[in-house]
Structure formats: structure tokens, C-alpha cells
Amino acid sequence: MKKKAIFYHAGCPVCVTAEQVLVAALDPNRFDVEIVHLGEDRGRLPEAEQAGVNSVPALVVDGQVFHINYGASLSELKQQTASS
């Protein structure tokens, strides 16, 4: 059975590089990977926050959050949503 992996990012250069490298490294036979661009799909910010994501890029695998480098905090993304 495949594990669910969700890669959250906001489209910044750090996020895009992490997506290209990390997601490509995951074995598609073992992981069902979903990529969520929070800059484009802001409605999923609460979901990411509830999963424990504090900043992006981040990978969530079976409820475990792996923060990768530092692109933007979720609070920054939420502020951008409020001002839009």
C-alpha cells in the first residue's frame, strides 16, 4: 500500500527547487505524491496548518511534517490572502 505524501509550497525559488529534487527522489511505487501550491490554492492553507506545517516548502508523509529549508511562513501566506 502506498503512503500519502503532500508537498506544500508557495512557488518561491526555494520551493520550486525543493519540489523538483525531493518529489523526483520519492519512489512512485511507495508514495502517492500530491503537490499543493499554496500561493495559487490559498483555500488549502487551513489544511496545511492543521497538518502541522509552519513554513513552506514542507513535505507531509503519514502525518509527519518535514520542513525543508525556509521559503515562507504560513502566517506570511495568510497575510497575503487577507490583503488580496
Image: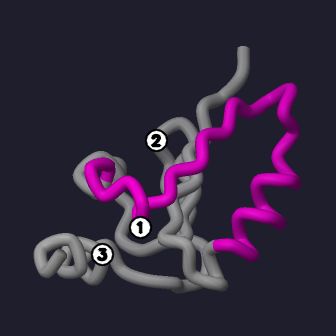
> Which element type, helix, strand or loop, lies under badge 1?
loop
What scheme was used to colour the molecule?
one colour
Q: Which residues are magenta?
A: 16-44
For badge 2, the amino acid type reads Gly
Q: Is residue 17 above or below residue 58?
A: below
Count of marks, rendered view: 3
Residue 9 in the image: x percent, y percent? 52, 65
Mark pair 1, 2: CA separation: 22 Å
CA distance separating discs 3 and 1: 7 Å
Mark in front: 1 vs 2: 1
- The residue lying at 18 percent from left, 80 percent from top is 79
Image quadrant where residue 83 sits: bottom left
Q: Residue at x 71, y 22 (%)?
A: 2
Left or right of 16? Residue 43 is left
For the N terminus, give its image quadrant: top right
* Residue position marked by numbered label 2 in the rendering: 63
Q: Which residue is mark 3?
A: 77
Q: Earlier in the sequence, mark 3 or mark 1?
A: 1
Q: Say which of marks 3 and 1 sits in front.
A: 1
Circle 3 packing at 10 Å, graded few (<14), some (14-19), many (20+), is: some
Which label number is shown at residue 39? 1
The percent position of residue 36, horizontal first and vertical second, equals 51, 51
User: Where is residue 76 shown, x and y percent of the image?
Assistant: 28, 83
Residue 40: image location, x then y, percent: 42, 60
